[in-house]
Amino acid sequence: MKSSSLVELALSAQGCTQKELALKLRVSPAQISKWKKGEHISFEMSNRLSELAGLGDLDPDVVLLAGSKEDAGKWVQLIRSLAELSEFSAETGYNTAPLVEELDDDSCHLFWNTFHVLQEMGVDIPRPFPEELEACIADGDDEDEAIWNNEIASLIYDMFKALTDVYGFYAAFVADLVFDEGLDLVDTPAWELDSELLSLAASKLDLDASKIPGFPRFKKKVETEVAEMVTYLKERAFRAGIPLRIELMDLVFDSHDELGRAAEAHSFGVDQSRLHPDIYMNELLTGMRVIHQVLPVIMKKLGIEDEFELDTSELRLGR
């Protein structure tokens, strides 16, 4: 989407036609049309279009979503403040990487991801930036009552707060599996799991479907997609004989509070010796396969392979 956003914003900022923009960039009008349709754009041309649009460090997709450069800057500032507040109040014992990384650099990834999730839920992004939040942005007061009274701001905070719990569980029980070189999960469904965590966190909120009609559909879609990813991960771990310390499907169906408590307990070492039943079953099956291979060899050496007959009645319960 970025190339089309850059073209649209450059055209608007320069007040020119596509043909005139092509002349400024010394490319063909056809190339401008291709970029407008989303064709890949070079780093050099991306920078030139960004300069013509006057974007500075702002992401063009962010500017289009927000409606203007000024409002994009305000939204980014608000989201960073809410991210910092959410991470500060997290109780899992794990850093929430998507929030922390946003605070450590000038990336707009969290903004884009947040607004994408809101759109998927059917929430309209207010334009222009809400007036009641202007003072909070100007004063840097991220705990102003205006934030909690504003539906969109309080919803974003709730999403981030739920994300601290969901990501804590992911960091405690899932991340090591996803990045285990032995499982080789690159380019598999499980590899994309961390990119779905904000959507998953949002799906765990208790929202009024009468106010957000698209939420039930969104929740079902996210749960289905993430369940497929987790199922794939469990199967690969099972085949590799890697022990699971918890039921990974809890990530999908438990509340964010339950996930947060599980992550917190793990960070304190409460369950370090616990193994999920799947690993015991895996060990049992492995043992049965070994017996199946070794027993015929032993019987042959004893010369009883032809006369041995298994009496299944002796295997029945209660005998």
Image (cartoon, grey):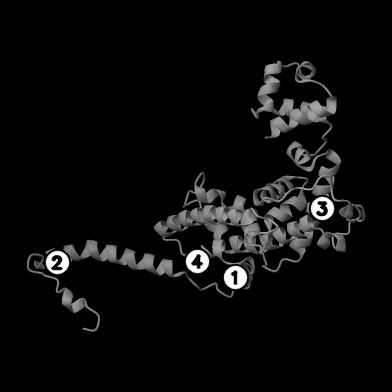
Count residues near mark 2 (Cα–Cα under 10 Å), then give few for <14, some for 14-19, many for 20+. Answer: some
How far across and down, in percent of the image, does residue 98 sit? 69, 53
How far across and down, in percent of the image, does residue 44 sit? 73, 26
Disc 2 to disc 1, C-alpha distance: 49 Å
Q: In the shown orientation, is residue 6 left or right of residue 277?
A: right
Q: Nearer the viewer, mark 1 or mark 3?
A: 3
Mark earlier in primary sequence (1, 4): 4
Q: Amino acid at mark 3?
A: Leu
* Nearer to the camera, 246 or 286: 246
| SS at mark 3 in the image | helix
Mark earlier in primary sequence (3, 2): 3
Q: In the shown orientation, is residue 211 left or right of residue 281?
A: right
Tell me if residue 261 comes above or below residue 197 in the rendering: below
Q: Amino acid at mark 1?
A: Ala
* Identity of the residue drawn at 86% across and 63% down: 145
Which residue is under mark 1? 262
Which residue is under mark 4? 247
